[in-house]
Amino acid sequence: MGIGHLEIFSLLLLIVIVALIVIWCKEFIFMMALGDSDYPGRYDKTLWFITFIIFSIVAPFLFRGWKNAIKAQVE
């Protein structure tokens, strides 16, 4: 008996979920490790914290884009 389509789909779904969790944790830890002076606005860190909690799936990608945009403005 071979591996069925459901098993393959389940395995791929598990891999995607684990990858999203790892990316979320990495970006969340990086965001929390930044100091308040690294953010241009007074409440940016708090707003990003709320964004990470409410929009868990897309927040790491939004934060990475925002971080790269801020970095490009400084350079």
Image (spheres, rainbow, N blue to C red):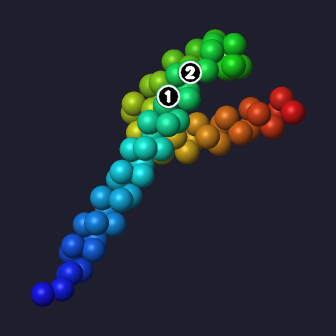
Q: Nearer the viewer, residue 3 or 62?
A: 3
Location of residue 53 with respect to 62 vertically, above or below: above
**Disc number for residue 68:** none
Give the class, few, some or many, for how many residues have Cα within 10 Å of label 2's Cα (few <14, many ≥20).
few
Residue 21 showing in the rendered view: yes
Q: Residue at x 55, y 45 (%)?
A: 61
Please tell me which residue lies in front, 62 or 7: 7
Q: Looking at the picture, how far across and down is residue 64, in whole percent?
A: 61, 40
- Amino acid type at circle 2 is Ala
Please tell me which residue is depicted at 39% across the width and 30% down the height of the picture. 53
* Image coords of residue 8 (percent x, y): 27, 74
Specify whether residue 48 is in view. no
CA separation in Å, label 2 and label 1: 6 Å
**Relative to residue 9, is residue 27 depicted above or below?**
above
- Horizontal side of 49 relative to 73 (left or right) equals left
Residue 39 falls in image quadrant: top right
- The residue labelled by disc 2 is 33
Residue extending furthest toward the front: 1
Left or right of 70? Residue 51 is left
Instruction: Look at the image and tell me in which quarter the C terminus lies.
Output: top right
> Residue 52, image x and y in percent?
45, 32
Which of 1 and 67 lies nearest the eye of the viewer?
A: 1
Q: Residue 74, how many percent across, how many down?
A: 83, 29
Q: Which residue is pictured at 71% across the width and 39% down the height?
A: 68
Label for residue 29? 1
Q: Is residue 27 above or below residue 1?
A: above
Q: Mark 1: which secondary structure? A: helix
- State the residue at coordinates (74%, 32%): 70
Q: Are the two marked residues, 2 and 1, in contact with CB atoms closer than 8 angstroms?
A: yes
Point out the residue furthest to the right here.
75
- Looking at the rendered structure, the kind of residue marked 1 is Ile
